[in-house]
């Protein structure tokens, strides 16, 4: 106990202060509560193949830099997961990770979502709005389908990457932000540059670190580890013991070509866990892969 607190208790004992006065004095001496330090979630790439092991090493190297990152790969290959792995293994890990799905936002609102806006900047802008760059200060902004950014937004983003500051829509005050930009696309972004649909200087800024996320059919060595992971994940959600996967069911999973990649595998395996009535997943629990009789 601190000396000052002991003194208050002595005064209370000697009837020189009331109980209420003592509580008030002791309360004033308590240090202000600090906000809890946010825990950094564990985000990992599932797999045991030599490719996956080397990929982890490469991601660690990229995470150790402060450069923008461009992640390319087919739909469902886990591009946002890769972005999170880079974020949570970087100097930005203690800051926010904010993902923005560019293609799902109207063209007229993209600038407002990323850079924010001032009151009356446009019709309907009744109050000030912080954009994702402000919200994610000291963290990472992941721009999903970055190829869908309007050219005007590309101009703004390039200026931010060069200068480190931006203006809200309708604003003139420069706002500085320490943010790492990660862009994802399922297309070859260089083709968009050649077609004049994407700024070449922005492309070269983003492509300092390029990560190619491979399709599942090219990393089938990781299939058993991925299946086990998704089985255990769904079983935990359902509060049940994870079922085994029969050899016949596993054979079907190997034979399928996975057009939607790991995302499709996750959905199919999770559904099989739900449908499974015993302690083993069989081909009957994989109706979309089982040929009709």
Image: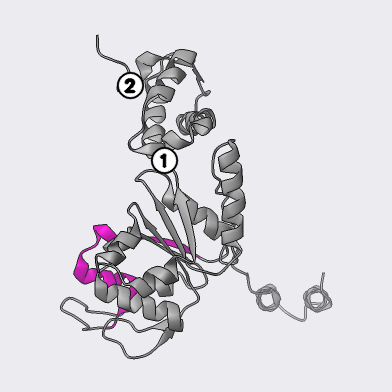
Q: Residues within 10 Å of mark 2 (few under 14, many from 20)?
A: some
Residue 54 on image: x %, y %: 60, 46
The answer to if 280 sits in the magenta stretch is no
Residue 128 on image: x %, y %: 30, 80
The answer to if 109 sits in the magenta stretch is yes
Which residue lies at the image location 22% right of the left edge and 79% below the top edge? 126
Picture quarter with the C terminus: top left
Instruction: Choose between 239 and 64: the one closer to the eye.
Output: 64
Nearer the N terminus, badge 2 or badge 1? 1
Which image quadrant for residue 45?
A: top right
Instruction: Choose between 93 and 198: the one closer to the eye.
Output: 198
Which residue lies at the image location 52% right of the left edge and 69% below the top edge? 67
Answer yes or no: is residue 30 visible: yes
Residue position marked by numbered label 2 in the rendering: 289
- Position above or below: 219 against 278: below
Magenta residues span 96-118
Disc 2 + disc 1, Cβ < 8 Å? no
Label 2 – label 1 distance at C-alpha:
19 Å
Residue 28 on image: x %, y %: 66, 78
Count of numbered marks: 2
Can you name the residue that lies furthest to the front here?
Answer: 194
Q: Nearer the viewer, mark 2 or mark 1?
A: 1
Q: In the figure, is residue 194 to the left or right of 227?
A: left
Can you name the residue that lies furthest to the left here?
Answer: 123
Q: In the figure, is residue 49 to the left or right of 152?
A: right
Which image quadrant for residue 192?
A: bottom left
Residue 98 on image: x %, y %: 42, 62
Residue position marked by numbered label 1 in the rendering: 215
Which residue lies at the image location 80% right of the left edge and 79% below the top edge? 4
Answer yes or no: is residue 130 visible: no
Which image quadrant for residue 169?
A: bottom left
Which residue lies at the image location 78% right of the left edge and 77% below the top edge? 8
């Amino acid at each position: 106990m601190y000396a000052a607190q002991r003194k208050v208790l002595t005064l209370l004992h000697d009837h020189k202060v009331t109980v209420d006065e003592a509580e008030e004095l002791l309360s004033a001496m308590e240090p202000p509560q600090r906000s809890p330090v946010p825990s950094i979630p564990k985000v990992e790439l599932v797999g045991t193949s030599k490719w996956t092991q080397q990929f982890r090493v490469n991601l660690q190297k990229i995470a150790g830099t402060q450069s923008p990152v461009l992640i390319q790969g087919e739909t469902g290959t886990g591009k946002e997961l890769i972005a999170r792995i880079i974020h949570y293994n970087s100097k930005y890990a203690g800051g926010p990770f904010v993902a923005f799905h560019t293609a799902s936002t109207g063209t007229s609102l993209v600038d407002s979502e990323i850079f924010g806006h001032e009151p009356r900047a446009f019709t309907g802008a009744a109050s000030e709005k912080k954009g994702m760059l402000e919200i994610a200060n000291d963290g990472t902004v992941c721009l999903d389908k970055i190829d869908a950014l309007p050219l005007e937004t590309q101009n703004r983003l390039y200026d931010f990457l060069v200068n480190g500051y931006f203006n809200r829509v309708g604003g003139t005050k420069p706002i500085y932000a320490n943010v790492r930009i990660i862009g994802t696309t399922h297309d070859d972004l260089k083709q968009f540059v050649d077609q004049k649909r994407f700024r070449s200087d922005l492309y070269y800024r983003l492509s300092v670190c390029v990560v190619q996320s491979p399709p599942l059919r090219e990393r089938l060595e990781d299939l058993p580890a991925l299946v086990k992971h998704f089985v255990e994940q769904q079983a935990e959600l359902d509060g049940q013991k994870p079922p085994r996967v029969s050899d016949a069911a596993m054979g079907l999973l190997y034979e399928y070509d996975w057009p939607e990649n790991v995302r499709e595998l996750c959905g199919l395996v999770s559904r099989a866990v739900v449908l499974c009535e015993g302690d083993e997943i069989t081909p009957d629990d994989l109706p979309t892969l089982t040929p009709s009789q």
